[in-house]
């Protein structure tokens, strides 16, 4: 079992920045991929960014060049630095991990609201 706790969401004006953090606990030795997804009201939950245990990253086209994902394996933590935020980035952001057995775990979500 892996437990995930997110922090760092909030309200920000368009053009501003936020950094999300997600700390994993439990059976962390088996974590392969860490990432973030988001879900806006009435929409599906979509991948935002992910990072593998080897450091390979993947981003949704809508956030490339604005968001940066990073992980600290010693702290079992994944970060999402979000710059140049837009109102369309408003959503609940969920941290997730996928372990080497392809099982996924999700955090409880943190709200990000970008005002215009």
Image (cartoon, rainbow, N blue to C red):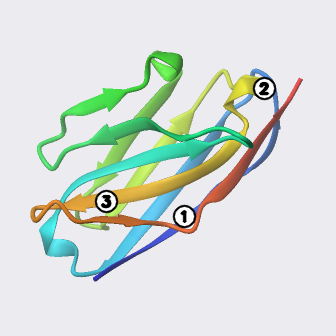
Q: Earlier in the sequence, mark 2 or mark 3?
A: 2
Which callout, 1 or 3, points to the residue nearer the camera?
Answer: 3
Callout 1 secondary element? strand
Residue 108 drawn above or below residue 19: below
Question: Do the residues bearing badges 2 and 1 touch, measured as CB atoms within 8 Å?
Answer: no
Which is nearer the N-term, disc 1 or disc 3? 1
Q: Which residue is mark 3?
A: 97
Work out which quarter of the rendered image holds the N terminus and state it: bottom left
Q: Which mark is residue 6?
A: 1
Q: Position of residue 74 (x, y in %)?
A: 23, 66
Q: Is residue 85 left or right of residue 19?
A: right
Place of residue 107 in the rendered image (x, y in percent of width and height, measured from the top left): 49, 66
User: Residue at coordinates 52% horizontally, 38% vertically from top-left?
Assistant: 81
Q: CA distance from mark 1 to mark 3?
A: 12 Å
Mark 2 vs mark 1, foreground winner is 2
Residue 43 picture location, percent across and down: 65, 38
Q: Residues within 10 Å of mark 3 (few under 14, many from 20)?
A: many
| Labelled disc at residue 71 | none
Q: Count the marks.
A: 3
The residue that disc 2 covers is 87
């Amino acid at each position: 079992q892996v437990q995930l706790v997110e922090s760092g969401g909030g309200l920000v004006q368009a053009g501003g920045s936020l950094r999300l953090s997600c700390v994993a606990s439990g059976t962390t030795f088996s974590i392969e991929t860490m990432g973030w997804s988001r879900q806006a009201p009435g929409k599906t939950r979509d991948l935002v960014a992910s990072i593998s245990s080897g450091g390979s990253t993947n981003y949704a086209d809508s956030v490339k060049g604005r968001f940066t994902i990073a992980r600290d394996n010693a702290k079992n933590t994944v970060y999402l630095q979000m710059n140049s935020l837009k109102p369309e980035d408003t959503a609940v952001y969920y941290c997730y991990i996928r372990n080497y057995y392809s099982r996924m775990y999700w955090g409880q979500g943190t709200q990000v609201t970008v005002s215009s």
